[in-house]
């Protein structure tokens, strides 16, 4: 069974940091584009960050650029999202997703085939 499992969410004060992890099982995603999305209450799911299958190319939403960093460790079949200088508006459920094989750093949500169950991030002011 193919699974993506996120971890690392939690409650943090504004200005703090969290590191999210997304561990894949059931198959390797080392050749897939990977992404992080988030969904806040009452809002649509939005792209946060993406990384190409080789790992050298990344893409960020304007709202997180300079604060968040996406990375991947293909040997561990894991993708990370380092989140610094967190703001209350970063509060959301964060999802990782696997996209096209040999893919680039950003796609619409409907082009990611596998999704995790999400991890909650709450940033208090």
Image: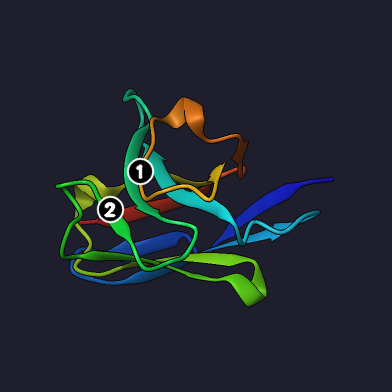
Q: Nearer the viewer, residue 76 or 121?
A: 76
Q: Position of residue 2 (x, y in %)?
A: 77, 46
Quarter of the rendering containing residue 19: bottom left
Compared to residue 6, the image places residue 67 above or below, namely: below
Compute the Cα span from label 1 to label 2. Answer: 6 Å
> Residue 121, percent across and down?
40, 53
Q: Residues within 10 Å of mark 2 (few under 14, many from 20)?
A: some
Q: Is residue 84 left or right of residue 24?
A: left
Name the N-terminal-most of marks 1 and 2.
Answer: 2
Position of residue 10 measured from the top left corner of the image (x, y, whole percent) = 45, 61
Residue at point 47%, 66% (across, down): 80
Q: Which residue is mark 1?
A: 106
**Along the horizontal axis of the image, is 123 left or right of 36?**
left
Q: Which secondary structure, mark 2?
A: strand
Residue at horizontal 81 percent and vertical 54 percent from the top: 26
Q: What number is the disc on residue 59?
A: 2
Q: Are marks 1 and 2 in contact (CB under 8 Å)?
A: yes
Q: Callout 1: few (<14), some (14-19), or many (20+) C-alpha neighbours within 10 Å?
A: many
Secondary structure of residue under mark 1: loop
Question: In which quadrant is the N terminus drawn?
Answer: top right
Q: Identify which residue is drawn at 38% across, 41% down.
A: 38
From this view, report whether residue 75 is shown above or below residue 54. below
């Amino acid at each position: 069974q193919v699974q993506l499992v996120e971890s690392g969410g939690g409650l943090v004060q504004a200005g703090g940091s969290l590191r999210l992890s997304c561990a894949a099982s059931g198959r390797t995603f080392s050749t897939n584009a990977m992404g992080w999305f988030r969904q806040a209450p009452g809002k649509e799911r939005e792209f946060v960050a993406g990384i190409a299958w080789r790992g050298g190319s990344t893409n960020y939403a304007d709202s997180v650029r300079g604060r968040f960093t996406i990375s991947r460790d293909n040997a561990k079949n894991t993708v990370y999202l380092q989140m610094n200088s967190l703001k209350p508006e970063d509060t959301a459920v964060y999802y990782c997703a696997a996209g096209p094989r040999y893919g680039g750093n950003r796609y619409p949500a409907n082009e990611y085939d596998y999704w995790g169950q999400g991890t909650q991030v709450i940033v208090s002011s």
